Image (spheres, rainbow, N blue to C red):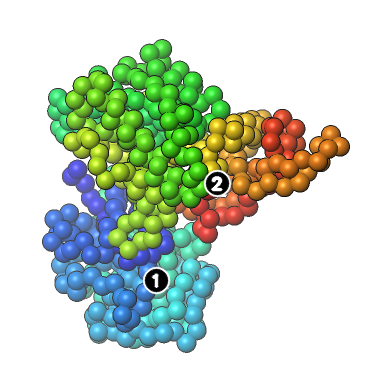
Amino acid sequence: MAREMIIVLDFGGQYNQLIARRVRECNVYCEVHPYNIGLSKIKEMAPKGIIFTGGPNSVYGKDAVVCEKEIFDIGIPILGICYGSQLMAHLLGGKVTTAPVSEYGKTEVAVDEHTQLFTGVSDKTICWMSHTDYIEKAPQDFTVTAHTPVCPVAAMECPERRLYAVQFHPEVMHTVEGIKMLQNFVLKICGCKGDWKMDSFVETMIQTIRNKVGGGKVLCALSGGVDSSVAAVLMAKAVGRQLTCVFVDHGLLRKNEGDEVEAVFGPDGPYDLNFIRVNAQERFYQKLAGVTEPEQKRKIIGEEFIRVFEEEAKKIGAVDYLVQGTIYPDVIESGLGKSAVIKSHHNVGGLPDHVDFKEIIEPLRMLFKDEVRKAGLELGIPEHLVFRQPFPGPGLGIRIIGEVTAEKVRIVQDADHIYREEIAKAGVDKELGQYFAALTNMRSVGVMGDERTYDYAVALRAVCTSDFMTADCAQIPWEVLSKAANRIVNEVKGVNRVLYDCTSKPPATIEFE
């Protein structure tokens, strides 16, 4: 796609995806790539600017991750953040050492010079620091543009070489004027127009898909969730009846969800799709019997999905392409460059080594969740489908701690249905990014009807988030939680205790597995 682009080189930083997200908020397209992608590939992509992420290593240590020094001479503006700033200083002749005092959290930064990067930024501004090393001395020809009482080089730049660096993290919301700084870099320094919009993405992607597929047959993995639904409609717009959507009911869906998906995408629904529903509940339960480790469950479910699709493909004849609703957080969390693998998503890290299709198409692979929703609206998908609750591909299999059984699925389905019903009745659902019930593997003693019970504990979770990469625990009104808990204990057989998960992401993930 011909468009302006900023690339983020990942040195293992925990906020790499947030940097990309903030750049896209400037209406400029952005991709994350591993730090060692190579100079020739970077030149081939022709970015308007490059951002180095933070990272856990020391630039002078044996485990340092280092890019090619020649990158600083290609004339493309570069912004180094945290480790990225230290790497720039280290490679260009400055001095990086262990800081006498580490800085973590909100820190007041004094801006010494209001250069292009700091246009419109206050003389003293609150920024988010997270470092044990610091730049003791900036390289020759660099100007120090900001400092703190313990960090002599909180920012530096060499505008003649189009090189900029900040020790703090402008991408996190705790840096009060961080978005302004990133806008200055992307729009003023890199000269981007900021004209990347979702309508242009949809139009370009439809044409790209048509060119790729030609007259080939396409099989779409349809779960009925937001991502796969948008992917399915996008593919239908591009290739029409060349597309067959296969909906695998693996028995791990929310209560009544299988029938709801068929009502929307089946023969009586509003879309002109070839639709096949496969009821494979027992097959998945058998594969998961005795398995308790969440990563193993994810991979089993992911592989079984692919096997079912292969079988359906053989029934309808030769199929050239498999479509999946993979989105960017799936890709990043499954491991990119030096980033840690958070979890294997069933449509990324969970794929088996051998897949019997010519190619897998992931039209939403480079979009964040809110961007997927915008694409859905652009495609004309009704709002109630576009804004439905996210649901993981492995389904309730990863919302059940320990072994998955039909009985446990029934428990979590019923509990989740009650919880979601009470959330909706209270009118707080629109404020939440995601909310659901999970089944813990803990059983404890209770008293019901004057008799001793020894049953499961259900955990309720609700988070507030815009991009699903970070999330805060939602403060659900106590009366709502209390009513949901009472109903679950009274109405769901096998449950005698309800807990509320009040952990943010990080350190937890949004899912409860």
Q: What's the amino acid at mark 2?
A: Gly
Residue 1 located left or right of residue 438: left
Within 10 Å of disc 1 (Cα), the crowding (few <14, some 14-19, many 20+) is some
Q: Quadrant of residue 457?
A: top right
Residue in the picture at 49% in, 22% down: 260
Within 10 Å of disc 2 (Cα), the crowding (few <14, some 14-19, many 20+) is many
Residue 250 located left or right of residue 211: right
Is 334 located above or below residue 264 in the figure? below
Q: Position of residue 466 (x, y in %)?
A: 48, 46
Secondary structure of the residue carrying tag 2 is loop
> Given the current orientation, which residue lies at the most extreme right position?
450
Q: In the image shown, does 494 or 379 lie closer to the viewer?
A: 494
Distance CA(mark 2)–CA(mark 1): 32 Å
Q: Which residue is mark 1?
A: 56
Q: Which residue is mark 2?
A: 402
Is 439 located above or below residue 492 in the figure? below
Residue in the picture at 30% in, 25% down: 312
Residue in the picture at 33% in, 81% down: 61
Q: What's the amino acid at mark 1?
A: Pro
Q: Is residue 282 visible?
A: yes
- Tell me which label, 2 or 1, sits earlier in the chain: 1
Q: Position of residue 385 (x, y in %)?
A: 46, 28
Q: In the image shown, does 298 or 239 lie closer to the viewer?
A: 298
Q: Position of residue 191 (x, y in %)?
A: 25, 57
Secondary structure of the residue carrying tag 1 is loop
> Label for residue 127?
none
Residue in the picture at 48% in, 49% down: 294
